[in-house]
Image (cartoon, rainbow, N blue to C red):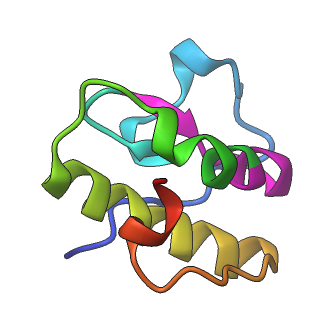
Amino acid sequence: MQITWKPVDHGTDSSRAKLPDSAFAFPQERKEPLTDAGHVRSAIARFGSVDGVSSSERAQAFENIKAAAEHYGIALKASSWHDLVG
């Protein structure tokens, strides 16, 4: 699965409406922004409660979350998106 997440420049207006799709864990739905460490932690915690997404979208989101977690120095213990739903 290809990573679509890209860090957002802090000088950029970070209001949710102005964020690029690439700033979200679920880019097609624009759900779970990954703009800083706090948002990455929130996306991890809320991953299983995101509604209206397919398994392939969850797999994509997990890859995006992993990339953002690495970027922001967050240890992600899950090895699969299945580990985050429960």
Magenta residues (range): 30-41
Residue 24 drawn above or below residue 1? above
Query: For the point 76% across and 83% down, which residue is it?
Result: 75
Residue 17 drawn above or below residue 5? above
Residue 65 drawn above or below residue 73? above
- Residue 85 pos. (x, y %): 46, 54
- Residue 74 pos. (x, y %): 79, 76
- Is the N terminus in the top left, top right, bottom left or bottom right quadrant? bottom left
Quarter occupied by residue 11: top right
- Residue 84 pos. (x, y %): 51, 61
Looking at the image, which is closer to me, 60 or 53? 53
Query: For the point 84% across and 48% down, which residue is it?
Result: 38
Query: For the point 53% across and 13% down, which residue is it?
Result: 17
Image label count:
0
Does the magenta segment cover residue 36?
A: yes
Left or right of 16: which side holds 28?
left
Does the magenta segment cover residue 81?
A: no
Looking at the image, which is closer to me, 53 or 72? 53
Left or right of 57: which side holds 50?
right
Left or right of 3: which side holds 9?
right
Quarter occupied by residue 62: bottom left
Task: Specify the farthest residue to the top.
Answer: 17
Residue 20 drawn above or below residue 79? above
Task: Specify the farthest residue to the front.
Answer: 86
